[in-house]
């Protein structure tokens, strides 16, 4: 029996109610390792670039990695992907928890969903069964209700459940997928893809752990993490990702009122400390992780009731619905998060759609009939929650916003759409590109549209004395690069450290784990027995990224789509960085240098022939050549 993988990826064809298994050998896993690599492989091979993302020709791929389900902390994550209904481009998201682990323990390294069911169904997957069950009676239920119902029906209260809520059923294009209620495949609209396939839930519970080559080495990593996580992760356990709110506000990098400003006068009541002291009632953790960074909150105030069943808001949600909408009440933010989680909507996208609508309304650009019953001003609690309710139910203005920035442009015109900040149709995460310029480059060139999870945080690499700078030094970078500069040094820093950080997406590891690249190499060796190297992991990561960009090239995306919203070429209107802006010429120069360093064409933004050959992706080069979009 091989170590680290089963060699099996489960396939379920919903159109024909058929189940089969794809067999893969060691070469496949050593080429991709898992996560994004497996997702990109399947999407590029099987999804027609012209297909409707909400039609039967799209596929939905879930992928674990060679590390998933071992005793190594941080290996509870899994990736998922499809052609995005939000952007029309390559779509991908990651989530933690237990779901990917239980899928692996059932004997599968991944799951590919094809076709489209005529009626609502759910999947029940264990070591000895794969069943497609009727879910007509579950359609319309919120996420938690569905989870509890399918656990009761399967007779397994410990089963892990990936599920969609009513927002995904109604095909809100930024709907997400909940995994056991506290973890979400948030970005790219994958919940809408699941909804279009009428797949309500995927219930898994395997019992067989994958074999590892060196059990003692694996356990040593687990012990090291148990004994050493507190120093590198600091207050993560106590305050979660919201611990960064105060620091970002002081630096002028806390997105405020739809990115008009960088500091928020009400930030103190949005901090991790305030949440911990007021509404926090517990902490949860992903599989095999000692950190317990996930928030569990509860609010009992009339009209703002928030259930502990859905965990609690993370930084992105707090900034998006909080400072981004001019809201300083953490209970209101928790309520907005609760509404999104029940209905499985991406909180980043939903919050940017609301803040964009608030700004457009304040500027008098929205038709009066669409504002009836809505108080869409920055700071309006009623406006925020009322508009979210409309989005969930696809009524009024919410029906337009449910289709994302592209839907706004199509229905209300480009002048209005300019206030709904996005890249390729995906709303921006809550990080300020006029401050974190490398992250801004990453937003622009990400194959999924704006994303922060395969990106860099520039302040980490601005101080050579910082312990975190060691990661850059290990990549051969010895000079710090200022957070807000652009140019050749920033392009190099971005490319090297983006690839370094993105290794976790192929290994399905938590990005917060304090593992160096060297440690990740040792983890893979311990699990698989392969004599892997830093170079091999980085090349696998670069390979998966090139495949995602190749998918976009076939779908018609070019360098013209790799652009930030006009807002970021205008000065910040307030905060510690008031007046700061991006230099347009320097931004594009740095972006193009990043293309060059990655082996991508400056016009098509697709990988060049030589780069594909260098990565061993000859079949991708042939595919792009046949499609007429291969860059020399």
Image (cartoon, grey):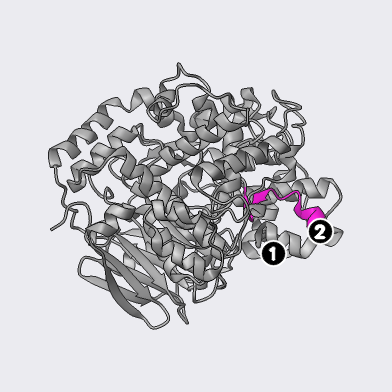
Point out residue 446 in the picture as x, y percentages from the top left corner: 55, 49
Q: Which residues are magenta?
A: 413-427
Point out the image quarter for the N terminus. Answer: bottom left
- Disc 1 or disc 2, which is closer to the eye? 1
Q: How many marks?
A: 2
Residue at (46% x, 36% y) in the render: 496
Residue linked to disc 2: 372
Q: Residue furthest top?
A: 465
The x, y position of residue 140, in whole percent, is 52, 69
User: Image point 51% across, 32% down: which residue?
Assistant: 493
- The answer to whether 615 appears left or right of 608 in the picture is left
495 in magenta = no
At x 72%, y 37%, the residue is 585
Q: Quadrant of residue 392?
A: bottom right
Q: Secondary structure at mark 2?
A: loop
- Left or right: 185 as drawn, with respect to 529: right
The picture quadrant where one finds residue 263 is top right
557 or 19: nearer the eye? 557
Disc 1 crowd, CA 10 A, few/some/many (<14, 14-19, 20+): some
Residue at the location (45% across, 26% down)? 477
Task: Please tell me the numbered disc located at residue 399.
Answer: 1
Residue 425 inside the magenta-drawn segment: yes
Q: Is residue 298 depicted above or below 223 in this figure?
A: below
Task: Tell whether label 2 touches label 1 (CB within 8 Å).
Answer: no
- Closest to the observer: 116 or 169? 116
Which is more N-terminal, label 2 or label 1? 2
Picture coordinates of residue 449 (x, y %)? 58, 52
Q: Give the alpha-carbon distance from disc 1 to disc 2, as whole Å.
A: 14 Å
Asked if 586 appears above or below 120 in the picture, the reply is above
């Amino acid at each position: 029996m091989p170590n680290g993988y089963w060699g099996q990826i489960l396939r379920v064809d919903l159109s024909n109610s058929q189940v089969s298994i794809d067999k893969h050998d060691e070469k496949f896993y050593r080429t991709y390792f898992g996560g994004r690599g497996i997702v990109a492989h399947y999407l590029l091979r099987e999804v027609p670039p012209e297909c409707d993302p909400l039609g039967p020709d799209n596929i939905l791929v879930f992928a674990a990695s060679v590390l998933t389900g071992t005793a190594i902390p941080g290996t509870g994550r899994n990736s998922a992907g499809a052609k995005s209904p939000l952007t029309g481009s390559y779509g991908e998201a990651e989530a933690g928890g237990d779901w990917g682990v239980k899928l692996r323990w059932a004997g599968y390294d991944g799951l590919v969903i094809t076709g489209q069911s005529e009626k609502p169904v759910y999947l029940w997957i264990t070591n000895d069964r794969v069943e497609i069950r009727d879910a007509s009676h579950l359609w319309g239920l919120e996420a938690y209700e569905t989870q509890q119902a399918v656990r009761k029906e399967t007779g397994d209260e410990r089963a892990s459940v990936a599920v969609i809520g009513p927002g995904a059923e109604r095909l809100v294009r930024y709907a997400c997928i909940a995994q056991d209620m506290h973890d979400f495949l948030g970005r790219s609209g994958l919940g809408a893809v699941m909804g279009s396939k009428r797949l309500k839930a995927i219930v898994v519970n395997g019992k067989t752990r994958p074999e590892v080559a060196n059990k003692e080495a694996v356990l040593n990593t687990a012990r090291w993490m148990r004994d050493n996580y507190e120093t590198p992760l600091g207050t993560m356990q106590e305050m979660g990702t919201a611990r960064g709110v105060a620091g970002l506000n002081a630096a002028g990098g806390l997105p405020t009122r739809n990115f008009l400003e960088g500091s928020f006068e009400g930030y103190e009541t949005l901090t991790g400390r305030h949440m911990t002291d007021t509404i926090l009632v517990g902490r949860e953790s992903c599989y095999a992780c000692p950190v317990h960074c996930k928030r569990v909150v509860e609010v009992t105030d009339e009209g703002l009731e928030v259930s502990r069943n859905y965990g609690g808001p993370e930084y992105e949600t707090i900034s998006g619905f909080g400072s981004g909408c001019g809201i300083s009440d953490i209970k209101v933010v928790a309520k907005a998060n609760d509404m999104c989680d029940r209905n499985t909507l991406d909180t980043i996208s939903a919050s940017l759609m609301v803040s964009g609508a608030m700004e457009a309304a304040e500027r008098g650009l929205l038709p009066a009939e669409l504002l009836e019953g809505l108080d869409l001003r920055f700071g309006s609690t009623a406006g925020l929650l009322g508009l979210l309710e409309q989005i969930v139910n696809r009524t009024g203005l919410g029906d337009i916003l449910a289709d994302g920035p592209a839907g706004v442009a199509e229905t209300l015109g480009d002048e209005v759409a300019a206030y709904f900040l996005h890249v390729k149709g995906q709303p921006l995460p809550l990080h300020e590109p006029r401050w974190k310029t490398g992250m801004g480059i990453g937003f622009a060139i990400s194959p999924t549209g704006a994303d922060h999870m395969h990106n860099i945080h520039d302040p980490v690499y601005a101080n050579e004395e910082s312990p975190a700078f060691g990661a850059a030094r290990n990549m051969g970078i010895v000079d710090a690069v200022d957070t807000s500069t652009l140019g050749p040094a920033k392009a190099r820093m971005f490319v090297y450290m983006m690839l370094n950080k993105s290794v976790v997406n192929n290994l399905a590891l938590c990005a917060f784990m304090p593992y160096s690249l060297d440690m990740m190499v040792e983890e893979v060796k311990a699990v698989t027995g392969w004599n892997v190297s830093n170079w091999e992991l980085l090349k696998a990561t670069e390979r998966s990224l090139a495949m995602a960009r190749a998918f976009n090239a076939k779908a018609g995306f070019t360098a013209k789509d790799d652009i930030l919203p006009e807002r970021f070429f205008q000065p910040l209107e307030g905060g510690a960085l008031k007046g700061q802006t991006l230099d347009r010429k320097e931004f594009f120069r740095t972006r193009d240098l990043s293309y060059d360093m990655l082996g991508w064409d400056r016009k098509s933004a697709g990988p060049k022939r030589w780069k594909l050959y260098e990565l061993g992706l000859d079949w991708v080069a042939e595919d792009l050549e046949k499609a007429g979009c291969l860059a020399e």
